[in-house]
Amino acid sequence: MNKFYDKLDSWKKSFRSRKNYTTKDRHPFYEIAIPYLPNNKAEVIVDIGAGKGEFVNHLNLYAKYKNVFLLDANKHTIQYLKEKHSNAILYRAPEKLPFEDSTVSFIHSSHMVEYLNHVEFYTFLKEIDRILKDKGILMISAPLLWEEFYYDLSHVRPYYPDVFTVYLCSEKGVQTREVISKNYTIQKLIYRYTTIDSVDWGANSIIFDFIIQLLKKVLKNLGINKYKKNGFTLILQKN
């Protein structure tokens, strides 16, 4: 009976996740951060790869915290940010982050790590670990490998949640480099989804094929879709 309720609970979580996070809108993923933001308004919050500051603006962080920093590699974006916000800094990963050791309470990085090769990515993780203080939060959002991943020619490779937990939480995995830390714990992992058309379904018989194609349209009109994970948001805490 316990196994039944466990499976039922797992299905409910999966259903809610697919319902809430089958979207290209990043705002629902920004809101995942709310319970993990620091209580102390003087703590340092850093958004790496901030773009035009949507994360900070959506959560109104400049009005709530004294030390919010926006980092981005695009000089034109930084010029835009400086017209609207203070503490906008030109930064290109995996350069040394402009903060002292163990001084940052919350780090957010959305859709940035996929632009790094594996050496740059490892160096960047070490920099994050260096500046994040004990009990600090790391929030990473990134795409997974799916049909549209390489639509952007700047994308180098996808990094799955496991690579963060292997090198920061010291979970079991195939490691080609030294583990960076064993002091992080997973607080939350949310996947982003997309719906895909099952165009590969068919039949050799023209009659059965017609029935299958008709059934696919009926199911789609009823809101029954085929889902695929195409991204994630991972929240880790440094202990």
Image: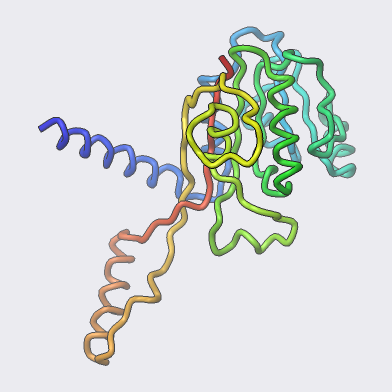
Quadrant housing residue 92: top right
Residue plotted at (67% across, 14% down) = 133
Q: Is residue 198 above or below residue 24?
A: below
- Residue 5 location, x and y as percent? 17, 33
Residue at the farthest left position: 1
Colour mode of the rendering: rainbow
Quadrant housing residue 84: top right
Q: Is residue 46 above or below residue 152?
A: above
176 or 69, nearer to the observer: 176
Residue plotted at (74% across, 20% down) = 131
The quadrant in which the N terminus is found is top left
Residue plotted at (56% across, 46% down) = 25
For this view, does 158 lie left or right of residue 22? right
Q: Is residue 3 above or below residue 138?
A: below
- Residue 98 location, x and y as percent? 84, 24
The quadrant in which the C terminus is found is top right
For this view, does 168 lie left or right of residue 190? right
- Residue 125 location, x and y as percent? 69, 32
Q: Is residue 236 above or below residue 122?
A: above
Residue plotted at (41% across, 69% down) = 197
Quadrant housing residue 146: bottom right
- Residue 143 location, x and y as percent? 58, 49
Q: How many numbered tags mark residues here?
A: 0
